[in-house]
């Protein structure tokens, strides 16, 4: 009789401690199916209940800020990008994950840095993206690794309606890797904390970077005026471009076009003091500061960033894993391997709210820098930084 009562007590205790988790997500189709499968696995393994609620991507931050303090928000958000962290941290609605993530060795360091805000890990990264140079193997037999080799290949493939290298030169995001290689930066990084009062987009390195972008058009005659990302992709999928700067988002069209492609890093530009380091965007799972089931929600988040889960997620939607073990097991996939190297070599986009003051002036300045030959880069960039500083509160 005592054994029966003991078994009953254990069973009741298990039921009482089981958590009912609410998960908000913007995922659709195959990725939503993946999330539901992950939830089912977690339920079976832990006895907890997971309810997945679809919320439009752009609505999640404001809705979380409004509903979480009222006890109406989720336990977990799957997923948001790092540039939302500052806003959510200021509102006090995200819980630091440091106590739950005791080991980060399997997570790409760039991705971890992207989700670290004011010294705290404010989420578990799940996937990331960064640009790389996609090349047509029919036109480029061996990926160039130096600027001299790159220029030689590019110029050899330019002319008669064909192009050796195309990129949207006026796009600040796309060309940040070049800016960073010369020593330009958005906000000075002091041991993981961004100093928003120190904007490095008009320093000597940033000037040199703008000059090099201008040279790609007017000195080396590689990228004609008027070429944006759409025109560059169209020419690449037509087989008329040897090398094209883009990200994972264009790979479906490139594959559909039947291009035999490879992916490489942009080489260190001439006279640069550092290696090419493109912007990296990361999305991850966020734990609500108002969750009543934080340990269980964190356990589910950790499961979704495990190597097995990341591989399944990649198969569902093609996202680049942040799990290093998952990347190793997916090494036969050139998209994962190629862009994975860009991510690891990259710089996280700033996750502070002040980044919103940067994009407009900076983007305009980069666009102006490549509109004609021999422009005054210093004047253009200084004006942009003055506007940025004026906009930062």
Image (tube, rainbow, N blue to C red):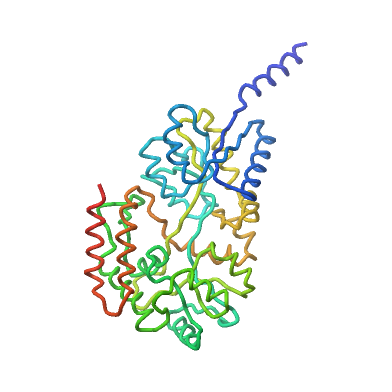
Q: Residue at x 36, y 78 (%)?
A: 270
- Front one among 370 and 242: 370
Residue 3 vertical placement versus 206 (above, below) = above
Q: Which residue is drawn at 53% across and 37% down?
A: 76
**Relative side of 70 to 392, left or right:** right
**Relative side of 104 to 179, left or right:** right
Across and down, in percent, residue 382 comes to: 22, 64
> From where the camera sits, is residue 95 visible?
no
> From where the camera sits, is residue 195 visible?
yes
**Relative side of 234 to 207, left or right:** right
- Front one among 191 and 27: 27
Across and down, in percent, residue 230 comes to: 49, 69
Examine the image and state in which quarter residue 47 appears: top right
Q: Residue at x 34, y 76 (%)?
A: 214
Work out which quarter of the rendered image holds the N terminus and state it. Answer: top right
Across and down, in percent, residue 26 comes to: 54, 45
Residue ranking furthest to the right: 1
Residue 215 vertical placement versus 95 (above, below) = below
Across and down, in percent, residue 320 comes to: 56, 58
């Amino acid at each position: 009789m005592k054994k029966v009562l003991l078994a009953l007590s254990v069973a009741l205790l298990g039921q009482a401690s089981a958590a009912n988790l609410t998960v908000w997500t913007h995922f659709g189709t195959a990725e939503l199916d993946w999330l539901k499968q992950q939830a089912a696995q977690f339920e079976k393994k832990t006895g907890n209940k997971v309810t997945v609620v679809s919320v439009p991507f752009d609505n999640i931050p404001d809705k979380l800020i409004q509903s979480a303090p009222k006890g109406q928000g989720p336990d977990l958000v799957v997923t948001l990008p790092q540039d939302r962290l500052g806003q959510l941290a200021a509102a006090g609605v995200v819980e630091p994950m440091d106590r739950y993530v005791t080991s980060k060795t399997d997570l790409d360091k760039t991705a971890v840095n992207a989700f670290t805000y004011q010294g705290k890990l404010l989420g578990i990264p799940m996937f990331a993206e960064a640009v790389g140079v996609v090349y047509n193997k029919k036109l480029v037999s061996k990926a160039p690794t130096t600027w001299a080799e790159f220029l030689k290949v590019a110029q050899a493939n330019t002319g008669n309606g064909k192009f050796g290298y195309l990129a949207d030169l006026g796009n600040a995001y796309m060309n940040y890797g070049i800016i960073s290689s010369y020593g330009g930066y958005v906000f000075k990084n002091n041991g993981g904390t961004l100093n928003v009062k120190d904007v490095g987009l008009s320093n000597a390195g940033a000037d040199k970077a703008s000059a090099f972008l201008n040279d790609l058009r007017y000195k080396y005659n590689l990228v004609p005026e008027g070429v944006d990302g759409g025109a560059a992709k169209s020419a690449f999928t037509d087989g008329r471009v040897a090398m094209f700067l883009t990200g994972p988002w264009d790979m479906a069209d490139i594959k559909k076009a039947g291009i035999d492609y490879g992916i490489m890093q942009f080489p260190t530009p001439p006279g640069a003091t550092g290696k090419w380091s493109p912007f990296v965007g990361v999305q991850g799972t966020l734990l609500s500061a108002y969750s009543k089931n934080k340990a269980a929600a964190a356990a589910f988040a950790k499961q979704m960033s495990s190597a097995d889960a990341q591989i399944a997620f990649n198969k569902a939607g093609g996202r680049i894993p942040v799990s290093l073990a998952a990347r190793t097991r997916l090494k036969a996939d050139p998209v994962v391997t190629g862009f994975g190297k860009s991510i690891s070599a990259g710089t996280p986009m700033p996750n502070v709210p002040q980044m919103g003051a940067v994009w407009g002036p900076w983007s305009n300045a980069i666009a102006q820098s490549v509109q004609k030959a021999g422009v005054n880069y210093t004047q253009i960039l200084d004006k942009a930084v003055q506007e940025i500083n004026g906009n930062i509160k």
